[in-house]
């Protein structure tokens, strides 16, 4: 039965590290809404009490995302299963630099059920000359999935990897004209652990030289 709003309704927010973990009252969190700074994945719920009758809200998970930038040159990588924001070398609030040509690899585990979904926006990219490209696999020798930059500003069409397949993002800029660049989110679903082998191996011949 829903509470009729009036005097005597109290609120107590709680947090837990997992959905099945021990719930702890959050000191001072006794209003209908609660704002938190999240530094680790945390579950939240609220206990609402009217007189001696209490109800508990459905818990919700708030995830803390790491932040990675694509280097101006060279390459960096993200460990499989690490949900992360991805920015160009200007970071979350700065412009990217001229003469950039770097990559970031979103690693995956071959044979696993792990799937990467890449979403986000871009703005202020020099329409004539700068761009970012998304490839399947590790490095830029894989299949080119998408190229963005010619429109300057926009939203990417979500890129979804095959299970166990890595993705690589390349950011390039020429010697003049910069802007805000890209702001992407990479999220992993499934497991990064490959299942154990099955079946009977057929080794074939033993050879010598």
Image (cartoon, rainbow, N blue to C red):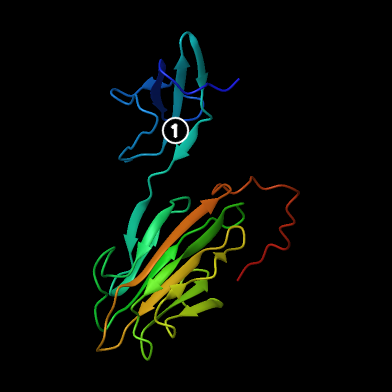
Q: Quadrant of residue 152?
A: bottom left
Taking the view exactly as shown, the residue that stands out farthest to the top is: 52
Left-right relation of 50 to 183: right
Inspect this view and state whether residue 40 appears. Answer: yes
Above or below residue 88? Residue 11 is: above
Inspect this view and state whether residue 141 appears. Answer: no
Dot 1: element: strand
Residue shown at 33%/78% (left/top)? 124
Q: Quadrant of the C terminus?
A: bottom right
Residue shown at 44%/74% (left/top)? 154
Q: Looking at the picture, tell me which residue is in the foreground, 124 or 114.
A: 124
Residue shown at 27%/65% (left/top)? 91
Residue shown at 37%/62% (left/top)? 86
**Residue 186: percent from left, percent from top:** 46, 58
Q: In which quarter of the image is residue 205?
A: bottom right
Residue of label 1: 43
Above or below residue 24? Residue 100 is: below
Above or below residue 187? Residue 92 is: below
Q: Looking at the picture, tell me which residue is in the foreground, 107 or 48.
A: 48
């Amino acid at each position: 039965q829903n509470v009729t709003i009036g005097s005597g309704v109290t609120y107590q927010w709680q947090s837990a590290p997992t959905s099945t973990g021990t719930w702890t009252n959050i000191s001072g969190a006794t209003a209908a809404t609660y704002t938190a700074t999240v530094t680790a994945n945390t579950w939240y719920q609220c206990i609402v009490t009217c007189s001696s009758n209490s109800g508990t809200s459905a818990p919700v998970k708030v995830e803390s995302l790491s932040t990675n930038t694509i280097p101006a040159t060279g390459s960096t990588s993200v460990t499989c299963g690490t949900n992360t924001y991805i920015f160009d070398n200007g970071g979350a609030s700065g412009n990217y630099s001229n003469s950039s040509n770097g990559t970031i690899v979103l690693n995956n585990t071959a044979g696993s059920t792990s799937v990467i979904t890449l979403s986000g926006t871009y703005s202020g990219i020099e329409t004539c000359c700068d761009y970012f490209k998304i490839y399947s696999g590790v490095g830029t020798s894989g299949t080119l999935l998408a190229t963005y930059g010619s429109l300057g500003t926009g939203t990417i069409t979500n890129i979804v990897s095959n299970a166990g397949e890595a993705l690589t993002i390349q950011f390039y800029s020429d010697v003049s004209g910069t802007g805000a660049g890209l702001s992407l989110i990479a999220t992993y679903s499934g497991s990064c652990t490959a299942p154990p082998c099955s079946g009977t191996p057929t080794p074939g011949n033993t050879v010598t030289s």
